[in-house]
Image: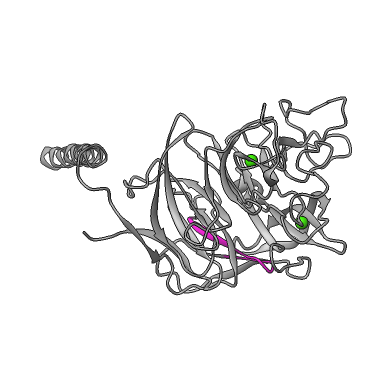
Amino acid sequence: MKMPLFVSLFSLFMAIASCDLTDDQQDNNNNSNTPPEKYELAQAFPSLTFEQPVELTSPNDGTNRIFVVAQKGKIHVFPNKSDAASATVFLDISSRVVSGGERGLLGLTFHPDYKTNGYFYVNYTGGNPLQTFISRFKVSAANPNQADPGSEEILLKYNQPYSNHNGGKVTFGNDGFLYIAVGDGGNGGDPQNYAQNRKELLGKVLRLDVNKTEGNLKYGIPNDNPYKNNAEGYRPEIFAYGLRNPWRMNFDRTTGALWAGDVGQNKIEEISIIEKGGNYGWRIMEADECYGGRNCDKTDLKLPIYSYQQGSETGRSVTGGYVVRDKNLPGLNGKYVYGDFVTGNIWALTFENNKAVKNELVTKLDNGLSSFGEDTQNNIYVLAYSSGKVYKFSPVKQ
Ligand SMILES: [Ca+2]
Ligand SMILES: [Ca+2]
């Protein structure tokens, strides 16, 4: 009777020992002179194709499902398995969405307590005149793969004076608050100077407490939002300002830092770490240069952690990505992986203490790099806008 116990304990010991060995090997790979691992893109779900996908995410509910947003107004759901045969329409709000160009259903995020409350949040453009809607929906009580389209609660809406620069991201921070990426409203050069005007929501990152209501608002203002109870008439929802079109921004779940790709005007694409109360410069600066060839005062303006000049080799529309936290990708783990929509370049930015150290080209995607995505196991995905395919990083055999 004792032998099996001994055997199982021995097996357990060996399992722990081999885990340690694997970690040591990974450290050696990172620190020794062995060449860095190279990556190519491989289809993550070969049987699945989506119409103009712009977002991929998963709720932290233990069900291991993936949700993909199609810009015209649908959310699709499927099991997180490479051989997933088909996806189900979770929500279809195409009739409420005005789509095309930079308009559409642009963002989706699940409440941190989605498993118990069934709430999720979307960012879309609709109406005439055009507005952005930040809305909460609820999953159907009867079917976890079906949302209730009648459950919409519009938390916040704001006018879009032009069809472009609508931001689009919604995501929860480790603080439990909802962060919203808002573009400058559009046209070119921010003609009404919205991004620097703190009485307007355009050109900002907003932060809301969706677990409260406050006065006439359908949300609360976190106590340490920079302009809570201010006397100047500034919008209390503002977390940071001076953004042009922060199409994609994502939290590093390990450090809590909020990384944004802010699309440039005619010259420079920008990566910034968004801090509370920060002024990220637009339209005074484009990335780290004075905008429009003018002299400018950069005092108190936040500079990007990294920027690149537009060009046929680099690109002209940054797609913000993720700080990779995936030990199965040692060549990318701990780096900020992002890309450019136009060229499809995908880079990995090495950084230390919020300073860029090295920027490496990882690989390239054809068909429009609309967004990166992350599932609950920290796997990173890449969305191809035109082909509708979902990719993952795969080590190149050397
Ligand atoms: Ca707009
Ligand atoms: Ca800036």
Residues in magenta? Answer: 64-76
288 left or right, relative to 242: left
Q: Which of 373 and 40 is in front in this view?
A: 40
- Which residue does the image show at 75% across and 42% down from the upper left? 195
Q: Write down the quadrant of residue 194 in the picture.
A: top right
Q: Please check the rendered image and state whether residue 294 is part of the magenta-colored stretch, yes or no.
A: no
Q: Please check the rendered image and state whether residue 75 is part of the magenta-colored stretch, yes or no.
A: yes
Residue 41 at x, y percent in the picture: 38, 63
Say if residue 180 shows up in the picture. no
**Quadrant for the C terminus in the image:** bottom left
Residue 304 at x, y percent in the picture: 57, 38
Q: Establish if 62 lies above or below 230.
A: below
Image quarter where ligand 2 lies: top right
Residue 372 at x, y percent in the picture: 51, 55
Q: Write down the quadrant of residue 279 in the picture.
A: top right
341 left or right, relative to 24: right
